[in-house]
Amino acid sequence: MKQLFIILFLLTLTSLLLTPSVYAAKVRVRKPRAAKTGVSYSSASVSPNTHSITLSLMNLSNVKSVTYELSYSSWEIPQGAMGSINVSGQTTDSRDLYFGTCSHGVCTPHYGLSAKASLLVCTDMTNGTQWCKRYNINTKRLQ
């Protein structure tokens, strides 16, 4: 009986020593986010007819400037377009970002586009803040 007690004691002690400790995670208390006012400064849409992306800018009354950068690959060669807009009184604007090259009024489209393109639009506000929005664009409609 004494041997059985010692064996059970050793088994219990061994299982306690070999069992990893488990700690409870702290409860996460999330701070409530400030409610967005529903203001959107940009939208992007693919335009297969013109082989481009139409970038529409709106609600520009409190916007100082807008920068944009389109990145994609054509036959695995990195391509892109970038630019900036200084807002001076207008409340809307738009840009047509062409998937191709233009020179002296002649435009040549890029083919063999990667499946995904990326458009980053950053809006600098008059109060000093900056809003950036990334669009992941499916280019299959252009091919």
Image (cartoon, grey):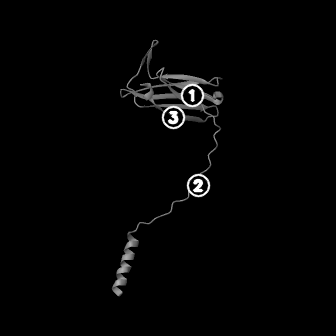
Which amino acid is tagged 2? Val
Secondary structure of residue under mark 3: strand
Kindly report which numbered mark, 1 or 2, lies closer to the viewer in this rendering.
2
Q: Residue at x 37, y 80 (%)?
A: 8
Q: CA distance from mark 1 to mark 2?
A: 36 Å
Residue placed under numbered mark 2 in the picture? 29
Residue placed under numbered mark 1 in the picture? 66
Secondary structure of residue under mark 2: loop
Foreground pick, 46 / 78 = 46
Residue placed under numbered mark 3 in the picture? 134
- Compared across the picture, whether 14 is left or right of 126 comes to left
Which amino acid is tagged 1? Val
Kindly report which numbered mark, 3 or 1, lies closer to the viewer in this rendering.
3
Foreground pick, 82 / 92 = 92
- Compared across the picture, whether 143 is left or right of 25 comes to left
Residue 18 sits above or below residue 118 on the image: below
Residue 140's disc is none
Which amino acid is tagged 3? Arg
Q: Position of residue 51 (x, y in %)?
A: 46, 22
